[in-house]
Amino acid sequence: MLPELRRRPAIKAIVYFDTENDAFGDRDISVDSSESGLAAFRRLAADPIFDVTVRPHAG
């Protein structure tokens, strides 16, 4: 995912919906549903691409 985000600098945010039951009711897509999933999320969130400063809109 990170290489793709670096190619698309106009993307400013990622939205993730954490749930134990998806639309089909049978898949746990929680960030911490597995150790490997949580580790992957932590690696993604710790990347410098997400180290940003939010400034008020000047207009």
Image: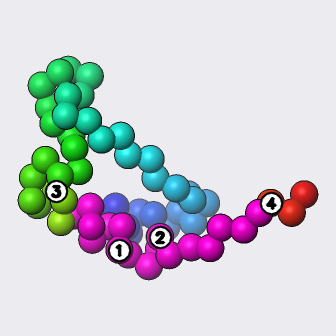
Instruction: Provide the secondary structure element on which disc 1 rests.
Output: helix
Q: Which residue is mark 4?
A: 57
Write down the quadrant of residue 21 in the picture: top left
3 vs 36, nearest the viewer: 36
| Residue 4 in the image: above or below residue 33 | below
User: Looking at the image, which residue is at 38% across and 46% down?
Assistant: 16
Q: Which badge, 1 or 3, is on the more N-terminal residue?
A: 3
Tag on residue 37? Answer: 3
Q: Amino acid at mark 1?
A: Ala
Q: Dot 3: within a 10 Å radius of its alpha carbon, few (fewer than 14), some, or many (20 or more) residues?
A: some
Q: Position of residue 8 (x, y in %)?
A: 53, 62
Q: How many marks?
A: 4
Q: Position of residue 7 (x, y in %)?
A: 49, 67
Q: Which residue is mark 1?
A: 46
Tag on residue 19? Answer: none
Within the magenta stretch, is there residue 22?
A: no
User: What residue range appears in magenta?
Assistant: 40-56
Q: Which residue is mark 2?
A: 50
Q: Are marks 1 and 2 in contact (CB under 8 Å)?
A: yes
Instruction: Provide the secondary structure element on which disc 2 rests.
Output: helix
* Quadrant in the picture for the C terminus: bottom right
